Amino acid sequence: MNPSHPSTPLRLGVCYYPEQWPRERWRDDARAMRELGLSTVRIAEFAWSRMEPEAGRFDWSWLDEAIEVLAQEGLQVILGTPTAAPPQWLVEAHPDVLPMDANGRVKAFGARRHYCFSSPSMIEASRRIVTAMAERYGRHPAVIAWQTDNEYGCHDTILSYTPAALAAFQRWLSDRYRSIEALNEAWGTAFWGLQFLSFEQVGFPVGQPTDPLPSHALDFRRFASDEVIRFNRMQVEILRAHAVDRPVLHNFMGLFGDFDHHTLGAELDIAAWDSYPLGHVDTAARFLTEPERQQWARTGHPDLSAFHHDLYRGIGHGRMWVMEQQAGPVNWAAWNALPLPGMVRAWTWEAFAHGAELVSYFRWRQLPFGQEQMHSGLNRPDGVLDLGGHEAAQVRAEIEQLLEAGGPDALTTAPARVALVVDYPSLWMSQIQPQGADMAGFGMAVRYYSALRRLGLDVDVVGPQDDLRAYALVVLPGVLHLPESLTRQLSGLSAVVVAGPRTGSKTDSLGIATPLPPGPLCKFLPIRVRAVESMRPGRRYAVATSLDDFDYRVDVAQHNGPQGGPTGELVGHGQQWRDLIEPEVDLPPVMRVHERFEDGWPARVSHGTWHYHAGLVDEALLQRWMAEAARAAGLQPVALDPNAAGLRLRRRGRWQFAINHGPQPATVPSPEGATRLLGDATLPAGGVAVWRLADGT
């Protein structure tokens, strides 16, 4: 089988920077890439200064040659637009290109991502270079796809505080609210007498003696997100005009939500992302405990990469590529561990299991100079194949073996039966008003996702705009604000719906929901949240089964304590957060209380097919709750090896994958009637197994 054939459903690639290496080395590199079994090469995303050495003068000779050298070896090129690294001549001629931090200090030339999305000069120059690239290479037979920019927002560069950004923000507010009176009403500026008299008076939500108005901060996040989307749209429109029939993608990041990925992804053909499992374990300190980070330091957390695979597959309309796959130690975390032998291979198969069409390693060769010289690649700086390179070669051989034995026709990616909703504006709300230091960001979503995956369930991570009708179980983990369209869609579902704490708690302007939380969901969940409590690490409430339901005879208007009654078996504990919920007395008394906290407040309730979790609980209890919800939805959780915390399953068409992140060996449940294609029934840490399921399974 030709590894570069475009019909191959499992493809391997690499990131390469020909401008960083002597020309005489390119042909040897391209030949070695082909011999290793790679089929695609991403290039050029940081090479603006080489393509346009001065304004309006282009030098394509080196890039023409690089593409030709790669094409002669049968390699296909993914071309990146170079706007992540504006050249020095541009920032010298147009200083407004450079972004400013919240203190008004310019972020200078000398690294990357040194631009403000609102800069007119940057937009004009970007339009020029992208147009010139697209005109020259848009129909080149070796260029099969285009990547816009590189990792929008990396190094905290979404928010910029330049004069251009301020003027654009004020225009954005004027377009959104039309009148300053409407803005004052929406923002609640009556608090502390903060009324504005004109849009020109509105500044950035930074530099005040204390926290800014929450609505002000939220609208600045919305504006900044829209600026990224506008900048990307400009590039996409140019590429669509000149690179006809070539897919356009962007390489998103992990654990990053500073702009609305769903909105930006709607204008792409494919969502790619950069998968660094060990780096993400180190940077996930907000919601992974230190023991967890120690446990997964060399293998990656078993659900962090998988969560992002499923997230970006949804953002990409069912198409997902891994544009940068970690192949060894990275250089950007506080501590940078060596992957456990076998993990580069396991991460690659994990991506394929979750629907990746392409896994592209970062990078071909470790560079002996520059800011990323400690960041590894498939090869060492001296050109010798490193461990990651050997494991990539192993995957290439296994792909051929599996496609020969299992058939590519079985490798489709069908929707899962479980949907987990992630909403980016809700992430911003949790960052602006966390109410608990560990409550911001993706933590709650990942915890719920992990509980579902520990049950052997496949999960689609979707946005609030996605169609939910095909799902049997829909999970809302901390979706603070529910757009009216999502509420309307939820009202017509026959699925079991699980709402996590804080769901429906905020208005569009980041106020407390009316009616009280869960706000618009109160018609399905006849409760109201009368108070919330965040808990310091180590503080816990015991949780026990409830022996009665809500007592609707209680006069809740006068009642200052929990509604209830006796409890039974101790089943776990609450931690981090809880909502104190009471029944909505105007609705029929049909609410079931499943568990209570030790002081009597309900911990989990249900009303028909709707479930509400009134707090965050330990891993085992959350898994128990989600298993009950799954069974109520007609799903069948799988009994995974209880001693193998790192074992995960994933189905893709008629192929069943098992990945063991360790640290212990894991016994894999063998599907009835399945044919094992790869691996054994017992997997070591870093082990992979693949079965072809029987027809009709």
Image (spheres, helix red, strand yellow):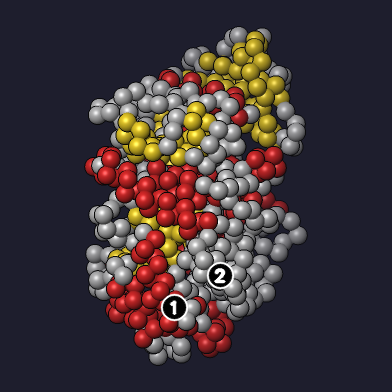
Residue at x-position 66% and y-position 44%: 293
Residue at x-position 55% and y-position 66%: 380
Residue at x-position 36% and y-position 63%: 35
Residue 25 disc label: 1
Q: Amino acid at mark 1?
A: Arg
Percent x, y of residue 24: 43, 82
Q: Quadrant of the C terminus?
A: top left
Q: Badge 1 local density, few (<14 within 10 Å), some, or many (20+)?
A: few
Label 2: which residue?
A: 381
Percent x, y of residue 478: 55, 38
Q: Look at the image and tell me whether residue 138 can be seen.
A: no
Q: Badge 2 local density, few (<14 within 10 Å), some, or many (20+)?
A: some
Query: Residue 1 appears in which quarter of the rendering?
Result: bottom left
SS of the residue under disc 2? loop
Q: Is residue 451 above or below residue 329?
A: above
- The tag earlier along the polypeptide, 2 or 1, is 1
Percent x, y of residue 590: 49, 14
Q: Amino acid at mark 2?
A: Pro
SS of the residue under disc 1? helix
Residue at x-position 39% and y-position 42%: 353
Q: Is residue 116 above or below residue 53?
A: above
Closer to the camera in the image, 479 or 562: 479
Q: Look at the image and tell me whether residue 393 can be seen.
A: yes
